[in-house]
Image (cartoon, rainbow, N blue to C red):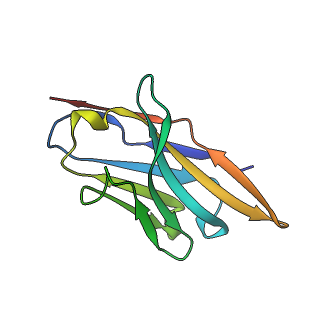
Amino acid sequence: QVQLVESGGGLVQAGGSLRLSCAASISIVDLVIMEWYRQAPGKERDLVATIRSGGSTNYADSAKGRFTISRDNAKNTVYLQMNNLKPEDTAVYYCKADQMFLGRKFTYWGQGTQVTVSP
């Protein structure tokens, strides 16, 4: 069982920045993929950014050019740096990790952290 704990959410004005953190209970080197999702009220949970064990990254179109996902293996933590925030970025942000073990994939979610962007 892997625990993921997000932090760093809060209230920020449009144009501001926040950095979210996702701390894992195991070495993130053992996690094949770590991702950030977000869910706004009344909407589905959407993928925001992906970082793989090899370091490659992908972003949703809404995040490109504004958000950066990164990892610190020594701290077992993945970050999401969010710049130039917009009110439409308001959502609960979740960290997700996939672990491969004995040929099976196990998926873990954090509890989420609220990000609110005021106009």
Q: Residue at x 22, y 51 (%)?
A: 83
Quadrant position of residue 111? top right
In this view, the residue farthest toward the right is 102
In this view, the residue farthest toward the bottom is 54
- Decide: is 69 above or below 88: below
Quadrant position of residue 69? bottom left
Q: Residue at x 47, y 50 (%)?
A: 36
The x, y position of residue 8, in whole percent, is 37, 42
In the figure, is residue 83 to the left or right of 15? right
- Decide: is 113 above or below 61: above
In this view, the residue farthest toward the top is 42
The x, y position of residue 105, in whole percent, is 75, 58
**Foreground: 6 or 62?**
62
The x, y position of residue 70, in whole percent, is 41, 64
Q: Residue at x 66, y 68 (%)?
A: 30
In the figure, is residue 3 to the left or right of 75? right
Quadrant of image for the C terminus:
top left
